[in-house]
Amino acid sequence: MQLSRRFLPPMSLLCAFEASARHQSFTAAAAELHLTQSAVSRQIRALEDRLGIDLFVRERQTVRLSPAGQAYAQEIRGALMRISNATLGLRTNPQGGSLNLAILPTFGTRWLAPRLPQFFSAHPGITINLTTRLSQFDFQLEAVDAGIHFGLPHWPGAELAFLMSETVVPACSPAMWAQHQFAQPQDLLRAPLLHLASRPDAWHRWFEHQGQPTNEVPGMLFDQFATAAQAATAGVGVALLPSFLIAQELASGELVRALPQLPEMESAERYYLAWPTSRSAYPPLQAFRAWIQASASSFMEQHVQGPATDAPSSP
């Protein structure tokens, strides 16, 4: 679609508007842009004249965005961020493309990052820029091409590609296991249970899965897997964690399965790659989507195995 220049205000006016909208102040915007307050005020008025709409409500010595200004500010901020990221990507990788990818912290650091050299080897011209997001976001307001999603296959305004499932296991330090000698699910209630903010009902579902539902699940709340895993390693409590994300700790003995005789529970949620429909044909995204789906499929084939049956050794 050809762009109409009559709908493209000068960049100087848009930058002045974005800064003023963010600060809710012409004076603060002027300081950021190294302009005078009167210069910023003139630029905002010039933009309003072009649009035929008041973007700010002026009250005595203060300004605030009008309803129309609030909506316009969101769109303009996202557009300017995309221009900035595109420019940065071109400067850092002039021979290829760049992919702005939102990742879940632990999945990104423990599963994705160690495999990225394989992707770069196959696609040397593509740069991946990583940013952390713990929950869904609006692709229209973020300068992100795709994101890793854990949950149900639903993300408003986005397309999804399945990556992998997961199983979770109660894990604790060897010392905590030796202290409590857990033998059945209800025994875990004698120890603090570590909860994840993103999965507040995970322990309830686990106890229901074991045929022993309970309303009392005392413990501590964590916002990330890595912190919960570290707390479990330190002996703070028992954490319900994806087994593939704590494989290193289980292999080294820093963590042990609290009830190794029980099968791991498969989570109802899954991992997906999500992206806005407008980016579906973007070549770096197409290359990354094909690679990560193949990598995830290979990983699942290699790591499908039965539950451990040996109890941890007492120290």
Image (spheres, grey):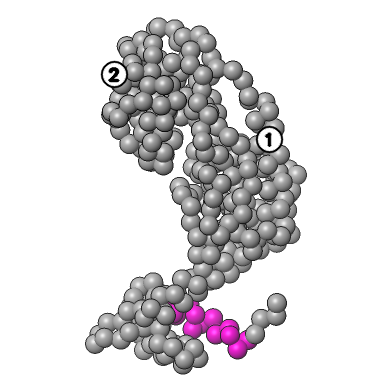
Question: Considering only order in the chain, which callout, 2 or 1, is on the residue closer to the N terminus?
Answer: 2
Query: What residue is at 71 percent from the left and 53 percent from the top?
Result: 286
> What are the residue bounds of the magenta stretch?
5-18
The residue indicated by pointer 2 is 190
Query: What residue is at 36 percent from the left and 10 percent from the top?
Result: 181
- The amino acid type, in three-letter code, at marker 2 is Arg
Q: How many marks?
A: 2
**Residue 6 among magenta residues:** yes
Q: Residues within 10 Å of mark 1 (few under 14, many from 20)?
A: some
Residue 43 place in picture, x, y as percent: 44, 87
Disc 1 vs disc 2: Cβ atoms closer than 8 Å? no
Query: What residue is at 68 percent from the left and 35 percent from the top?
Result: 297
Taking depth in this image into account, of 115 and 91 the one nearest to the observer is: 115
Assign the magenta stretch its main secondary structure.
Answer: helix
Question: Height in image: 289 above or below 15?
Answer: above
Residue 308 place in picture, x, y as percent: 53, 14
Whether residue 308 is visible here, answered yes or no, is: yes
Q: Is residue 105 left or right of residue 162?
A: left
The residue indicated by pointer 1 is 297
Q: For the residues marked 1 and 2, what is the alpha-carbon distance in whole angstroms?
A: 38 Å
